[in-house]
Image: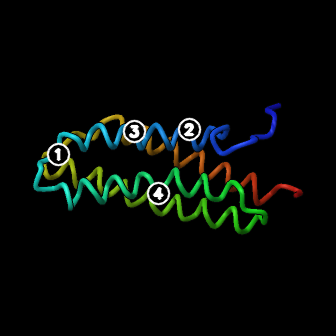
Amino acid sequence: MRKPAKTFKDLIVWQKAHEFVLEVYSQTEDFPKSEMYGLTSQFRRAAVSIAANIAEGFKKRGKRDKARFLNISQGSLEECRYYIILSKDLGYSKESELNQKLQEVSKLIDAYSKAILNSDS
């Protein structure tokens, strides 16, 4: 059995979300400069929001409050799912490992959220 996380950085779900953010930053680096304040900015902000809301929710006391932040993360994740499609359709990138990483993060958020809601504390 795993020992309880002391900080959000101990959470596998946050670690995987952070890896996703880093990959988004790397891939959007090659987007056209004309997208700097458009798709590049939106994509990066949505990706950061996933990990940031996991981190913020970590210190919330109530189960419902924690779950709410995870739900916000999941919303940002779906936004990123669209940006992956749009990036591909515009010819800026291929549907790469971003989809795989995103799916993994999505499953982890779902599992973490269910564990929190079903916990005794």
Q: Which residue does the numbered mark 2 point to in the structure image?
A: 15
Measuring from the top left, give residue 68's x and y in whole percent. 63, 67
Earlier along the polypeptide chain: callout 2 or callout 1? 2
Residue that appears at 24% across and 53% down = 40
First in sequence: mark 1 or mark 4?
1
Question: Which quadrant is the C terminus positioned in?
Answer: bottom right
| Res. 31 mark | 1
Q: Is residue 101 left or right of residue 116?
A: left
How many angstroms separate mark 2 from mark 1 (CA)?
25 Å
Left or right: 3, with 42 as reference point? right
Q: Which amino acid lies under the numbered mark 4 shown in the image of this protein?
A: Ser
**Chain-order first, disc 1 or disc 3:** 3
Q: Secondary structure at mark 3?
A: helix
Secondary element at tag 4: helix
Q: Is residue 8 above or below residue 39?
A: above
Q: Which mark is residue 49?
A: 4
Q: Residue furthest top?
A: 1
Which numbered disc flags the more N-terminal residue, 2 or 3?
Answer: 2
User: Which x, y percent locates residue 71?
Assistant: 58, 63
Look at the image and tell me in which quarter the N terminus lies: top right
> How many labels, in total?
4
Taking 7 as reference, is 74 above or below it? below
Q: Residue at x 36, y 54 (%)?
A: 81
Vertical side of 66 occupied by 89: above or below: above
Specify how the rendered protein is coloured. rainbow
Alpha-carbon neighbours of circle 2 within 10 Å: few (<14), some, or many (≥20)?
some
Q: From mark 4 to mark 2, how far is it between C-alphas?
A: 14 Å
